[in-house]
Amino acid sequence: MGGDSAARRQGIALALASAAAYGSNIVSAQLAGQAGLSGPLLVFYRVFIMLALVIAAAAVLRVSWKIPPGQVRPLIAFGLTSALVGSAYLSSVAFVPVTIAAVVFYTYPVLIVLAESVLMPARFSPGRLVVALIAFLGVALVVGPSLDSLDPRGLALAFAAAMLAAAQFFAASACAPTPLAPKLFWTHLLILPVTIAILWLAAGFQPPQAVAAAPIAFAITTGSYLLGFLLQVMALTRVAPGPAALAFCAEPVFSVLIAALVLGERLGLMQYAGGALVVGAIMANVILEQNRAR
């Protein structure tokens, strides 16, 4: 019991660290985009680099690529959902403002909490649903959506990204028995063709020397993604999808804070209030997990 409780706490801490990494990734990706490096191009290179690093590390450490019995289907599901969630979210902002897409996308923790009792050996928790709704409200206040343009195609893509994100969390939880190295390798091997197809459709491929236009932004974007994905995978081997997803509501809060520090963007009272709601929801989430472990 004590070990399970410690693992859950570690899982939530890893999820928060992953959210911080992903949050900084958004800001640096914006800076890279201003220098002419497109989103699909950044995704392609970061996936390629992840594969290269995993192969190199596995060669040095002599790690096996073998997939444990019964883990092929969960691993495929995790790889495909990881590839498609980014694609859907990235495509949605072509039709609706980023703020609208972000608010719709961050319904995924609520979807996970609602589905957890059906897909996982866990009882439905009304308290966690309330916490998820409070966190969602906080995200909405932090992002501050503009309702000027509500294209149904963008809304549909953003909600598809939310559903895919929920599926990704459950798939990651299901393939927890797979060791870290083969999980990262096979997942990104599945993601790579999807990113190549998107890059081809967008006609946006640029050679590696193109990153010289924004080397620091590219390095931070790539590094924060690698760290964020690694921590996310590690978190979901220790804690259930519901509490992990609630911790990830901190991602837009980190993004806004980093943007304020790095880009000089000013925060309004509503954003501070939203950030306080998200922090309060995460604290309540930790308390719920501790009570569940007793």
Image (spheres, rainbow, N blue to C red):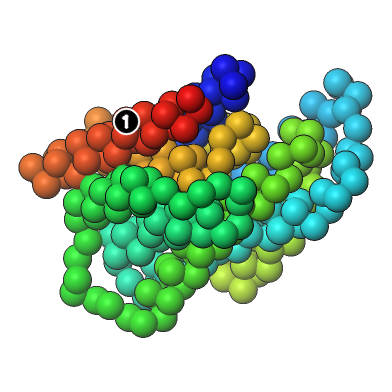
Q: Quadrant of residue 111?
A: bottom left
Residue 78 appearing in the image: yes
Looking at numbered disc 1 in the image, what kind of residue is underneath it? Met
Kind of element beneath mark 1:
helix
User: What percent of the width, then of the height, locates residue 249?
Assistant: 37, 44
Query: Going by the image, does 149 lie left or right of 163?
Result: left
Left or right, 130 with respect to 43, comes to: left
Say if residue 216 shows up in the picture.
Answer: no
In the foreground, 218 or 208: 218
**Residue 149 image point, x, y percent:** 24, 76
Foreground residue, 293 or 177?
293
* Along the viewing direction, whichever of 114 and 237 lies nearer the viewer: 114
Q: Residue furthest bottom?
A: 152
Residue 193: quarter of image: bottom right
The residue indicated by pointer 1 is: 283
Q: Residue at x 73, y 45 (%)?
A: 175
Q: Is residue 136 left or right of residue 86?
A: left
Q: Using the image, determine if residue 208 lies above or below residue 195.
A: above
Q: Local crowd at mark 1 within 10 Å, few (<14), some, or many (≥20)?
A: some
Farthest residue toward the top?
2
Within the image, what quadrant is residue 259 found in?
Answer: top left
Q: Is residue 139 left or right of residue 222?
A: left
Residue at image x 39%, y 34%?
288
Q: What's the residue at 79%, 39% (across, down)?
A: 178
What residue sits 61% from the left and 31% below the top?
Answer: 238
Q: Position of residue 66 (x, y in %)?
A: 91, 40
Of 83 and 164, nearer the camera is 164
Number of numbered tags placed on the structure image = 1
